[in-house]
Amino acid sequence: MRNVRLASAIAAALMAAAAATTAAAQDPAAAATSGGMRARAGFTPDPIQVRIYSGGSIDASRLGGACVGMIASAPDYEFTYTAGSFPLSFGVVSDRDTSLVINGPDGRWYCNDDAEGLNPILTWGRPPSGSYDVWVGAVGQAASATLLISESN
């Protein structure tokens, strides 16, 4: 009987831990905290510039791959794009070390850190149409940053 109670207690603890992890996960469906926009290939101005404050309470490395930095649960920006024949790039410029985490139209996670000095860049040579949910991560101290979205390489 003691083993059954111990097993039940362990199972309850594991379910509580799983629920906490789920509650802290990134939610691409959540409203973007810094807004968003819809654009078609050939948009102007190019680049689009968006002021963002980097960081959050969730470690992006839990997403795997090249994901690093601390990010929020909700995306910082949602860019809905109708593709054409141009490449599509997302970059961040900041005085602090930042990272870039994007949930692409295909539902996959794309991440970069330090492509150009301490600034991240992600580029799609043949971007799919759809929503790009963008998180700007803080690698170290959170800071003001500018998200750049461009069709120029």
Image: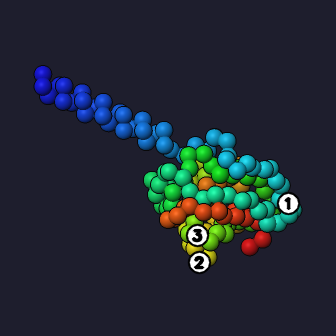
Q: Picture quarter containing residue 96?
A: bottom right
Q: Residue at x 71, y 55 (%)?
A: 128
Q: Evaluate whether residue 126 shows in this view.
A: no
Q: Position of residue 61 (x, y in %)?
A: 46, 57
Give me the disc on residue 117. 2
Coloring scheme used:
rainbow
Q: Nearer the viewer, mark 2 or mark 1?
A: 2
- Would you say 88 lies left or right of 102 here? right
Viewer-nearest of labels 2 and 3? 3
Nearest to the observer: residue 18 or residue 55: 55
* Residue 104 sits above or below residue 21 on the image: below
Marks 2 and 3, how far apart at CA:
10 Å
Residue that numbered label 1 is attached to: 43
| Residue at the image position 75 percent from the left and 49 percent from the top | 36
> In this image, 92 relative to 83: left or right?
left
SS class, disc 2: loop
Q: Is residue 101 above or below residue 33?
A: below
Label 1: which secondary element:
loop
**Which of marks 3 and 1 precedes in the sequence?**
1
How far apart are the alpha carbons under marks 1 and 3? 29 Å
Where, quadrant-wise, is the N terminus in this rendering? top left
The disc labelled 2 sits on which kind of residue?
Answer: Gly
Residue 12 position within the rendered picture, expressed as x and y whole percent measured from the top left = 30, 30
x, y percent for residue 3: 14, 28
Residue at the farthest left position: 2
Dot 3: what SS?
loop
Q: Position of residue 89 (x, y in %)?
A: 71, 65
Q: Which residue is mark 3?
A: 96
Q: Height in image: 152 above or below 83?
A: below
